Image (tube, grey):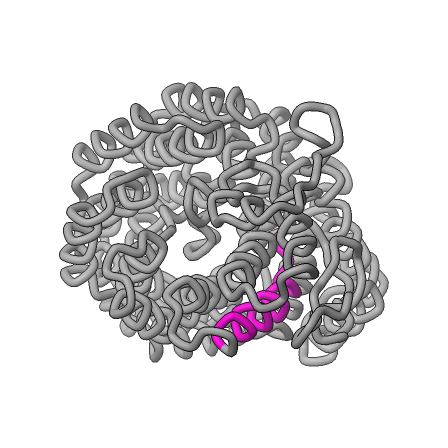
Amino acid sequence: MSPRTNDNEPTARPADAAEGDLPGGSSPSAVGGGELPDTGAGPTAAGDELPQTDDRVAAVRRVGAAGRRWRAARLAGCAALLAVALTGAAIAVGAARDGSPATVAAASGAVSPGLLASGDLDASIAALQTHLRAQPKDYGSWATLGLAYVEQARTKGDPSRYPQAEKALKRSLELAPDNDQALAGRAALAAARHRFAQALTYADQALKQNPYSERALSSRIDSLVELGRYDEASKAADTADERKPGVPVFTRYAYVRELRGDVKTARRVLEQALSTATTPGDVAYVSAQLGQLAWSQGEDKTALHYYARALAADENYLPALEGRARAQAAGGDRAAAIKGMELVVARCPLPGPLVELGELYEARGHDGDRAEAQDQYALVDAWIALAKANGVNADLDTALAAADHGDKAAALRAARAEWARRHTVHTADALAWALHVNGHDREALDYARRATGTGYRNASFLYHRGMIELATGHRQDGRASLAAALKLNPGFSPLGAREARKALEESK
């Protein structure tokens, strides 16, 4: 799914609504011509070890040696916490949805890609593994297993799953070259690693084999959006809607419209998608998207309504838990917001929630809150190090987090690198803000205007533009942009909204 982004994590929107969100681990078991991962925590399909706590500590210490200013002891502790959170996510999220252990089926029917819609990803992976031990040349099941690992990485916030996915998809293509399931899986994997040009190539290859592949159609929209090719993305969404209408396509269609500022159409399409949703996973997914859209427009009560609906369908659905915490913060219930965001980062320590929690601590201002906030920002560095080690392009995450809470020079390097790869509203905003915090305001202004040029209604973008306009002497424009940000979404950021109000007051 192409992201309806929050302000800290522009590319981390969940994949298809039909895909479950229960993670699992892996360990080896030899099968036929390839090696098959198991469900326990351990080595990968080819015998490679998953990153353990010591590896993550070392990764973070390397970050520190490169110039991070966090205290070494705190970094080590944060890295250990990240390892525990990633490992513990299988327990926290995967405590059975119905209170009982899942039954693992070994029949061939258990290997359908539809299993990923069951809401029990652990059981799906286990069933696939059992089947592949008996049928190691089933290329379709290898492709489905690869997709399952991509989903597992996403739902755990653990990029170390991606190499496993790559090996399973490669095995599928060795058995059946050019099969559309594996090609679509490679598109999804490339997108998850933020390699969007590569994802587009694989999606087009899959569609050449099967023009009606829902996953490939969806990945094609995602890739074009993330490359900033919005006109082409709109046409791709229309094509996908004609060929394969359904929740995955509807939600992408809505996001393309939202990027153009057409919130009314985006909401209508999402409501249509919700009316057609039949599984708990679909209901949770689309409801959370409606909640995100409402929150971005400053409609906190409406957002909380949709998040409640999502959590009624799946009480462990992390995007809804995260969104609810943001809406609670925007509505003034900081205590509930902090409690909710702490739960989210304990289960899935991704950069967006980590930065949000850190800013909530800073905004609260109790004794020790500043140190607590720094711990969250250090965890962002740990996650980025882990992501890069597993083939993920994390420059946008680096730019967004470091500009406000880390190494500003590193933020600018990362933002420039990302802009060189793709010209999206999100990369323009990130580069504009990184330039601003490094004192290059005149250069920043052009990018800030590009970020708001499509009509996309994003309060953080308006805030960044307003601050840059003030810094470049465009006082009237700056005040207008800041006022627009606060009118659109008064609670868009725990610290940003406060700074916007302060700047408005000081610029009178």
Q: Left or right of 315: which side holds 448?
A: left
Decide which of 286, 302 is in the foreground and name it. 286
Decide which of 171, 386 is in the foreground and name it. 171
Residue 456 visible in the picture = no
Magenta residue check for 160 = yes
- Residue located at (71% from left, 63% from top): 37
Q: Quadrant of residue 424?
A: bottom left
Q: Quadrant of the C terminus?
A: top left
Decide which of 161, 255 is in the foreground and name it. 161
- Residue located at (64% from left, 54% from top): 131
Q: On screen, 153 above or below 251?
A: below
Q: On screen, 151 above or below 345?
A: below
Q: Position of residue 309 (x, y in %)?
A: 46, 21
Residues drawn in magenta: 157-173
Q: Quadrant of residue 190?
A: bottom left
- Residue located at (76% from left, 40% from top): 91
- Residue located at (38% from left, 36% from top): 289
In this rendering, the count of numbered labels is: 0
- Magenta-colored segment: predominant secondary structure: helix
Q: Left or right of 475: which side holds 14?
A: right
Q: Left or right of 472: which side holds 453?
A: left
Q: Position of residue 505 (x, y in %)?
A: 36, 39
Magenta residue check for 15 = no
Q: On screen, 95 above or below 50?
A: above
Q: Position of residue 32 (x, y in %)?
A: 69, 72
Q: Quadrant of residue 219?
A: bottom left
Q: Position of residue 243 (x, y in %)?
A: 19, 49
Residue 257 visible in the picture = yes
